[in-house]
């Protein structure tokens, strides 16, 4: 397997022996020594082992050192924007060059949670989005550059792994994790096996005739995501000239939090909130019918305060949800670091499977 090959290629010839490697730093072009331990690679999985998590999202790159217990020791954050895969790869390498010298000597592996399509078995990053794709052997590149095993997966599937390892998903074999942030996506666990899907491009079931970038009308993502709510607010604002909702003149994002805050008193915000709640309700009921989960866990900035989920549950019907025996909940993991924990989980699981 590629994973085993990556580990073999990044392992020194003497088991258990730490080795040093120079990587570019950020101090005027100086090269900083980096001591890395392989303790745990050959069976010594002690509590001191740590893992590098790399969470690449639509707006930022978060890099952190995480323990096996899910404790985040240190992080660095970098703005991203609309990057190509190669540009993102360059940013990741620059971030690691600066970050790794700060980490403990117990780092065992690198884990990545990436936007877009990933071949996790082969360590390939296939695309960020439909218009930005080029197969990139990201795990091989990082393993060779930093002499550490590297493991990658889709960002939402990575967050699902964090739920299974550190959150409310522990012990649950049939689970759906839904992320509602800039976009909408889901991770599925069926019989203990993880998968992911672009559920944001399923129909919302509501006749708004709002065009989605995928080419369809009225997708769930175009109604309930952060970007979707912002676009809907701009589209409908001319019908509500007295709205108190701030619509940035420079084309900036309309705040989902402001929409929800004004939903009881502002007609535009009320309409946006209710249509989002109905769309989320339809999505939940459809997924239950399709997947028959024990539990559904939701995360992401749009739902993190519980307001939209509470509204959506008010529209759901009890009959299709009666078999969701472990309930529908918000994640208890910190929304700021769940992606980082998921990325680190990729590394932890990868090393466990390699032993």
Image (tube, helix red, strand yellow):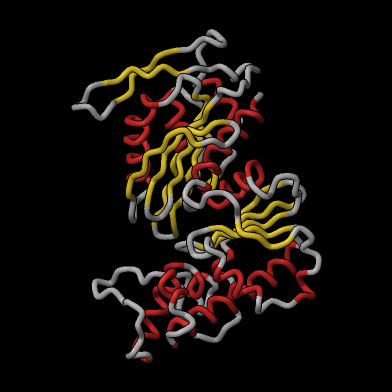
Residue 28 lies, with reference to residue 88, above or below; the image says above
Q: Residue at x 38, y 83 (%)?
A: 235
> Which quadrant, please, contains the N terminus?
top right
Whether residue 313 sits left or right of residue 214 in the image: it is right
Q: Is residue 124 above or below residue 20?
A: below
Q: Please say if 16 is above or below 127.
A: above
Residue nearest the viewer, comparing 323 with 42: 323
Q: Residue furthest left?
A: 28
Q: Residue at x 64, y 51 (%)?
A: 195
Q: Point out residue 153 in the picture as x, y percentages from the top left corner.
A: 54, 44
Q: Is residue 41 left or right of residue 77?
A: right
x and y percent of residue 111 in the render? 51, 36
x then y, percent, for residue 52? 48, 33
In which quadrant of the rendered image does the C terminus lie? top right
Residue at the image position 34 percent from the left and 36 percent from the top:
95
Q: Up-down: is 60 above or below 300?
A: above
Quarter of the image where one finds residue 232: bottom left
Task: Report the front residue among 272 and 16.
Answer: 272
The percent coordinates of residue 202 (x first, y second) are 59, 71
Which residue is located at x 40 percent, y 85 percent? 236
């Amino acid at each position: 397997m590629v994973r085993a090959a990556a580990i073999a290629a990044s392992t020194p010839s003497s088991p258990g022996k730490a080795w040093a490697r120079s990587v570019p730093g950020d101090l005027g072009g100086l090269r900083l020594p980096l001591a890395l331990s392989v303790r745990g690679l050959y069976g010594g999985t002690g509590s001191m082992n740590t893992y590098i998590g790399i969470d690449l999202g639509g707006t930022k790159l978060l890099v952190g050192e995480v323990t096996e217990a899910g404790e985040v020791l240190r992080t660095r954050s970098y703005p991203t924007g609309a990057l190509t895969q190669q540009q993102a790869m360059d940013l990741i390498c620059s971030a690691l060059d600066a970050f790794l010298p700060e980490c403990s000597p117990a780092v065992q592996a690198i884990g990545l949670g990436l936007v877009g399509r990933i071949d996790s078995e082969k360590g390939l990053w296939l695309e960020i989005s439909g218009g930005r794709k080029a197969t990139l052997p990201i795990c091989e590149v990082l393993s060779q550059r930093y002499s550490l095993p590297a493991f990658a997966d889709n960002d939402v599937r990575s967050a699902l792994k964090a739920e299974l390892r550190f959150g409310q998903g522990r012990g649950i074999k049939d689970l759906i994790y839904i992320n509602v942030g800039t976009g909408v996506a889901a991770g599925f666990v069926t019989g203990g096996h993880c998968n992911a899907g672009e559920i944001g491009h399923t129909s919302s079931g509501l006749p708004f005739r709002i065009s989605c970038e995928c080419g369809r009308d009225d997708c769930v993502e175009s109604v309930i995501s952060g970007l979707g709510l912002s676009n809907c607010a701009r589209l409908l604002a001319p019908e509500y000239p007295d709205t108190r909702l701030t619509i940035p003149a420079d084309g900036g994002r309309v705040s989902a939090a402001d929409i929800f805050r004004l939903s009881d008193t502002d007609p535009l915000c009320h309409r946006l909130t209710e249509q989002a709640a109905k769309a989320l309700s339809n999505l939940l009921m459809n997924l239950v019918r399709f997947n028959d989960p024990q539990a559904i866990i939701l995360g992401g900035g749009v739902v993190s305060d519980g307001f939209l989920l509470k509204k959506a549950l008010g529209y759901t019907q009890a009959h299709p949800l009666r078999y969701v025996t472990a309930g529908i909940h918000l994640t208890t993991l910190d929304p700021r670091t769940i992606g980082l924990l998921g990325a680190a989980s990729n590394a932890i699981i990868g090393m466990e499977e390699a032993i």
